[in-house]
Image (cartoon, rainbow, N blue to C red):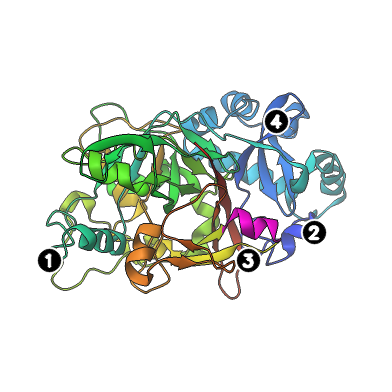
């Protein structure tokens, strides 16, 4: 189906809308006491369980129909790419402009299963078994590294091995959930450690991928197959307590400075929806090493994705004075040093079994240029304290600060694809 295919849901045909027929991102929404799987179309959500119950998905496999009636997406993720493809094709057919009287009658049936997005209450799209956070932006790694090791900002392994750590899945929350300021150990005034609420709370603008069907324990995922295992993308804020992090991270890496909360946006956007936005994978400088063979892709000319990522900040004072949030940075997914393919393949390269519903995040998305720093730690290093329109300064998040990370794809001639918005307000400890 072409990216310009029209839907009878009129708002979906507005190129600015973000939810065209080609996209149909997944979500889970609250329908009364029940949670249901849906897809976004225009300014509506199509109730996928309702479609199954009304016989509109007849002919698809029994496993697929069962997965459509589930309260989270894991069963559907598990069924694999061919089955999601068949379901998406059917949903697109139900929502495409009718070409005959039968299709017109069917569209009237489907219309009863649309819910306005503005009334929707979203729920966690999947039960997340494991959460892994990468460090895929060399610009981020270099800037952060230069704060600690000015003479040697990028460690020698960086361009050989996709760096990551195992995060905490239990504290992944949906956009809109307040983030309670964590307490923890950090260095005190005279270097003796103290236990206190963090004074250096930060955000990290990232994108996440949800795994579809995984690999068996002991098996790997070939780089050419890696994207078939990706169910879709979302926006991630990997909240971080910098003072706790710098005290605890040696020698094993992030621990409690990260595990108190991670926020995600409600939609999961299939890679198929972003076909028009594929761009070459990251360029390696002439003195960069080639990836080892298991990380070498034969599709490097389309391994990147042009997705814009912005961070906006609004303090409690700005809210009280009815000011809009201030955009503090703009980055792009295409600027990462490691691709989504490489992250998935590397993660499974030791035979570790990835499972449907696992979440992997890219790590902070920062570009080379000033204004693209995806966290306050970097912003402070390049620009000094952030001055808000209320004349408040920020080197770290204060109670009441609201952080909103948004991601979307947009270029001339193609409909905008909304990835999502991930917001959270910092609550006092
Ligand atoms: Ca991170």
User: Which of pointers 2 and 4 lies earlier in the amino acid sequence?
Assistant: 2
Residue that carries the numbered disc 4 in the rendered image: 49
- Horizontally, residue 115 falls left or right of residue 386, namely right
What numbered label is drawn on residue 210? none
Mark 4, ligand 1, within 8 Å: the answer is: no
User: Which of pointers 3 and 1 lies earlier in the amino acid sequence?
Assistant: 1
Furthest residue toward front: 190
Secondary structure type for disc 1:
loop
Measure how far apart labels 2 and 3 are at the Cα level.
Answer: 14 Å
Circle 4 crowding by C-alpha within 10 Å: few under 14, some 14–19, many from 20: many
Secondary structure type for disc 2:
helix
Q: Which residues are magenta?
A: 314-321
Contact check, label 4 and label 1, Cβ < 8 Å: no
Residue that carries the numbered disc 1 in the rendered image: 151
* Residue at x 35% of width, y 51% of height: 363
Give the percent coordinates (x, y) of residue 126.
53, 32
User: Which of pointers 4 and 1 lies earlier in the amino acid sequence?
Assistant: 4
What numbered label is drawn on residue 415? 3
Question: Does residue 309 appear anywhere in the picture?
Answer: no
Give the percent coordinates (x, y) of residue 47.
73, 37
Give the percent coordinates (x, y) of residue 83.
53, 36
Contact check, label 2 and label 4, Cβ < 8 Å: no
Secondary structure type for disc 4:
helix
Contact check, label 2 and label 3, Cβ < 8 Å: no
Residue that carries the numbered disc 2 in the rendered image: 10
Count of numbered circles in the view: 4
């Amino acid at each position: 189906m072409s990216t310009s295919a029209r839907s009878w849901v009129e708002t979906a045909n507005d190129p600015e809308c973000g939810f065209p027929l080609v996209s149909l991102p997944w979500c889970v929404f609250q329908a009364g006491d029940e949670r249901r799987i849906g897809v976004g179309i225009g300014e509506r959500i199509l109730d996928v369980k309702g479609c199954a119950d009304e016989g509109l998905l007849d002919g698809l496999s029994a496993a697929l129909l069962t997965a459509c009636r589930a309260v989270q997406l894991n069963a559907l993720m598990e069924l694999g790419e061919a089955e999601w493809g068949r379901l998406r094709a059917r949903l697109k057919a139900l929502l495409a402009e009718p070409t005959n009287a039968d299709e017109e009658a069917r569209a009237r049936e489907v219309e009863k299963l649309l819910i306005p997005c503005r009334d929707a209450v979203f729920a966690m799209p999947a039960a997340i078994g494991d959460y892994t956070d990468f460090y895929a932006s060399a610009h981020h790694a270099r800037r952060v590294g230069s704060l600690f090791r000015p003479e040697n900002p990028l460690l020698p392994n960086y361009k050989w091995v996709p760096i990551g750590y195992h995060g905490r899945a239990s504290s992944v929350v949906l956009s809109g959930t307040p983030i309670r300021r964590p307490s923890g150990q950090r260095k005190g005034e005279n270097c003796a450690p103290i236990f206190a609420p963090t004074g250096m709370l930060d955000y990290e603008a990232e994108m996440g991928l949800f795994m579809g069907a995984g690999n068996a324990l002991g098996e790997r995922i070939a780089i050419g197959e890696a994207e078939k295992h990706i169910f879709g993308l979302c926006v991630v804020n990997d909240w971080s307590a910098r003072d706790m992090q710098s005290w605890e991270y040696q020698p094993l890496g992030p621990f409690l400075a990260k595990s108190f909360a991670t926020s995600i946006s409600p939609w999961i956007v299939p890679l198929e929806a972003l076909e028009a936005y594929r761009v070459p994978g990251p360029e390696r400088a002439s003195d960069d090493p080639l990836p080892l063979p298991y990380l070498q892709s034969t599709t490097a000319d389309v391994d990147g994705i042009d997705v814009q990522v912005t961070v906006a900040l609004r303090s409690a004072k700005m809210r009280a004075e009815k000011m809009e949030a201030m955009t503090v940075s703009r980055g792009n997914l295409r600027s990462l040093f490691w691709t989504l393919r490489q992250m998935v393949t590397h993660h499974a390269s030791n035979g570790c079994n990835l499972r449907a519903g696992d979440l992997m995040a890219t790590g902070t998305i920062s570009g080379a240029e000033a204004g693209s720093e995806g966290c306050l730690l970097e912003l402070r290093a390049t620009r000094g304290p952030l001055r808000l329109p209320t004349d408040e300064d920020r080197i770290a998040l204060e109670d009441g600060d609201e952080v909103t990370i948004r991601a979307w794809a947009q270029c001339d001639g193609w409909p905008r694809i909304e990835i999502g918005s991930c917001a959270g307000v910092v609550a006092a400890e």
